[in-house]
Image (tube, helix red, strand yellow):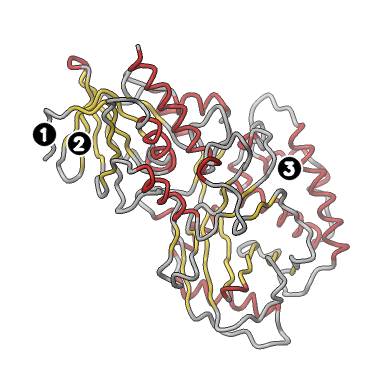
Amino acid sequence: MTSENEIFDVIIIGCGPAGIAAAIDFQKIPNLKCRVLEARNRVGGRVITDTITFGDDTPIDLGAQWLHHYRPENPLREHQHLTKDTYLNYHFVIRSSTTPFFDIDGTKISAKKVAEAEEIFNRLCKTIEETILPIDKSILDVLKDDFHEYEQITDKQIKRLIDLFFGIIEQYEASNLDQLSTKSYIAGDKGLEGCNLAIPNGFGLFIQDIVRKHDLSVELNTIVTRIDVLSNEELVRISTANEQTYLCRYVLVTIPLGCLKKQSIEFHPALPDWKQNAIDRMGVGISDKIFLQFSRIFWDSTWTSIFCTSARFRFILCRPENRMLIVKLTARVALEIEEKNEQETIDEIMNLLRSFFVDREVPEPTRYLFTKWGQDKFSQGSYSNFAVGTDNQTLIDLARECHERIYWAGEHANYDGTIGCVDSAFESGKHQAQRIAERFNK
């Protein structure tokens, strides 16, 4: 039991990127007493690198994989510089000589057909971006109700390709088109160039290294269950599942939006209606991966990915150096497969792969791993997005302090920048740390 005589200046709930960024900045303030409480048995949150399943020489990122928006202003840039082991990916190229396209029956689609579909897709996206609505609607509703071109496509293969391309948006946002806002389309990146940095040896290990280098004061396996604002004492009391109690002057809540939606922490007094409404409205998506390792490579070793018009398994990443294929899942398909028997899903994927390679023997995977972020009780989803009816004001409300002593940060609350990414969370944590520091200065 922590003594209630010990009073912290700030307690940060959650040691993901937002909490880490804030804790680093609090270290710079002389005599400020800060503690980070983390529910998991590790730091990093939704940024985790697995070096056990496939071995130390085959690290895999179960959650975040790229350092997005890599630029001088990126708050993580000071922690990760370009080296011979890192590389940048500036644009997501749909058509590439290293990415073959297959139809649902396993036949390869011609480059001409792909180009034709991509041209229509780009035109539709431009129209979505320029659409002005009196009341927000989902992207799917706009496509079906307002764009005659989409509904009038008669070539079924072209239609499947266009749906595949829209699947790229769904994969990036981690939600289906009928859940995503048209008014806030592409607002999550704030118009920044798509410059992404691949982290050598794994993003999760990189984040762990930041915590280790700064020697942050973190208590693991500490699940916060209740936060009481003690107005008369100008303090906050934090209670945990193992019956520990902490007192502090300010608390910074950085837990994922999915956990806030599930109300995993009880607040007294209750959260204001405007705060709870923002939590309820903002979107949270699911992005899962299935890692399949084989005894040998049976695909072209020059391929970086495989695209398929299957409505279930559209995007397969290739890692020939590790004899591995990574199947990307999102939204409802991901949620369905999280509940399904894993071997049944593998059988379904292998049947699809064998339809691509009818002229060769395709072996069964020797090892595999499924991520299930929707079932992770400390995340309850992957990352946020603009659901129908949300905009930047929603982010402002998510980040706005309440009860004078409760502050908020995370990738879902970065109203001055991007959302949904590791750098978004880091930026949000730094911003809120500055605001709390200003309170101490006053």
Cα–Cα gap, marks 3 and 2: 48 Å
**Relative to 49, is 235 on the left or the right?**
left
Identified by mark 2, the residue type is Ser
Residue at image coords 32%, 34%: 12
SS at badge 3 = helix
Cα–Cα gap, marks 2 and 1: 12 Å
Residue located beneath label 2 in the image: 239
The quadrant in which residue 7 appears is top left
Q: Tell us which disc is closer to us: 2 or 1.
A: 1
Farthest residue, direction top: 442
Residue 166 location (% of width, % of height) = 70, 51
Identified by mark 3, the residue type is Leu
Residue at image coords 36%, 35%: 23
Identified by mark 1, the residue type is Ser
Disc 2 or 1, which lies upstream in sequence? Answer: 1
Q: Is residue 51 above or below residue 283?
A: below
Residue 96 location (% of width, % of height) = 78, 61
SS at badge 1 = loop
Disc 3 or 2, which lies upstream in sequence? Answer: 3
Residue located beneath label 1 in the image: 3
**Relative to 68, is 214 on the left or the right?**
left
* Residue nearer the viewer, 413 or 261: 413
